[in-house]
Amino acid sequence: MPEAPTPIAVTRHAPPLLKDLAAVLTICAAAALFRITSFIPAVVDTDEGLYLVQARDWLHGGWPLVTAWDMHPVGAPAMFALAFLAFGVSVESARLLGMICVAATGCALFGAARAAGVPRPVGVAAGVVYAGLSVLLSGLGTNTELLIAPFVTGAMAIGMGATARAIRPNPVAPSWGELAFAGLLVGCALLVKQVVVPEGCLAFALLVLPAVMRQALPLRRAAAMAATYAALCAGPFVLMGLAYWSHGWLEQYLDGSLLAPFRYSMERIPGPEALRRIAAAALALGFPLGAALVAVISWRPGQAARPLQLLTALVTLWFVVASAAIAGPGFYFAHYFLLWLPPLSLLAVVGLWRLALVFARPGATRAVFAGLALLMAAEAWFLELHGRFERGPGWVLPDPVREVAAKVAEAAGAGGNAFIANYHPSVYVLSGTRIATRFPFPVHLTGFFEDLSDTNTLVELDRVLASRPRVIVVDRGWIHTMRPDAVERVMATVAAHYELYATVNEFRGPVEIYRVKPEDALPLAQPSERASP
């Protein structure tokens, strides 16, 4: 009898939508895992405390730059305020906001990889690696670089997709919808920090320039798109300015959002110190930078249309532009290098993919690649954990910031105010005390960045001290961060009108909490310039 025909093997594949959903869930889970430790320390980077204060006071009617000054636009306190509305006023709400932003950025990196046409595992790995790397360089706190990352990465993903379509044999021009979405994303990021400008320009170039070069987009239409994109990028900033203008606060808005950042960018740290900070950041990111170098070395100009080659070229350009954005302000603080992470994550996983293709046995490429990506993310996480356990606060030792906040709350009493001369401004929020000055970030009033605002800070300091705030906080270990004239004024006032209420030991020295003497206390001034947000 003839043999029965061999049945045809049927391989069932999950629909692309389900695979994409699984990818997004994986990235979100990685963000939750790697950033879960952010809820333990009260302070990771002191800048975060300023946004906490601004957001809290905004919800109580005091607008940023008016009642709480800063040298940034108001996007960061706006995002913090939204987190407070959703989750309550706390440090933990701010850290949850950071976790959400990291997860969103990871998903945008996945979208960028898929838009370039590379395999799905590469995009998933980029999101997971970004989540792991985000805890380095003070990234465990919710800083501006994490807040802008989802917007910038989303705009770059749109630009990469447009480039990939423009270099096909039948090039396709970008749509007005893509332009509008990318422009609004960059505009929202600009409302947080102007350092976005270089990357915003690159996103537009990727969106339009390849199509113009392939003659898929007429020059006249490209010019119209450029004007529209510029208007969309400026839109959120202008709309917020109109809101301030309607209350008579346009001068404060322009000073804090535009003029102060310009003054800041005119200053520079010495070259050797800049090189030291760059080297420190590069060493912290040594593993991903090494993998990224593999990707760059593997790039071949003649194969630029291939997905991996295209992604390598575009992301390398993105990394260079992000480096220019880091260098722009001229100070190279550790958290500035968080701008590297989105392009670096993509470039690093491309390098890992190349290594897996070369060294893994046939059939084991994806498993080896996944293991390398997890190792890269976990290495960054363990490096952060080492620092936390080595220093101890919030883990095996009490958190001194929370201890200071508790003592400040006791000393100030219900509805009391405080003046933090040179310590973390997050203590204002943790203790529930009011700010005694519109300059709650110490370096803007008593430190060496006092020339950023249009206010005479010595006059303001004298006013604050004369008002006799209920509590004054002095960090002896950070006394060098204060100008000598500010130290003299603060300590003279403390000696004459205050008594030592408590001392909390920080790893760098004691933090002193002073309470005003009952006979020297003045009636608390009512908060000025309040309005509904």
Image (tube, helix red, strand yellow):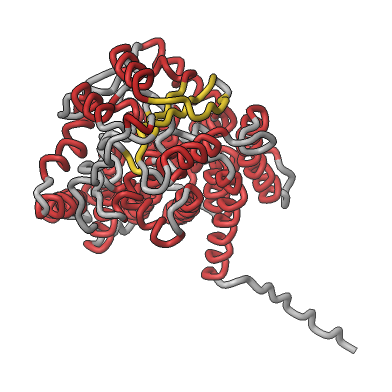
* 340 vs 267, nearest the viewer: 267
* 186 vs 290, nearest the viewer: 186
- Left or right of 183: which side holds 395? right
Above/below status of 430 relative to 269: below
Above/below status of 274 relative to 240: above
Q: Residue at x 44, y 21 (%)?
A: 278
* 108 vs 362, nearest the viewer: 108
Above/below status of 117 relative to 404: below
Q: Residue at x 41, y 14 (%)?
A: 480
For residue 160, say whether it is visible: no
Q: Residue at x 86, y 86 (%)?
A: 2
Q: Quadrant of residue 325?
A: top left
- Left or right of 111: which side holds 198? left
Horizontal and vertical percent for residue 532? 22, 58
Above/below status of 223 relative to 291: below
Horizontal and vertical percent for residue 24? 53, 60
Furthest residue to the front? 519
Furthest residue to the bottom? 1
Q: Residue at x 70, y 50 (%)?
A: 367
**What is the count of numbered marks?**
0
* 497 vs 490, nearest the viewer: 497
Horizontal and vertical percent for residue 230? 16, 48
- Left or right of 139: which side holds 82? left
Which quadrant, please, contains the N terminus?
A: bottom right
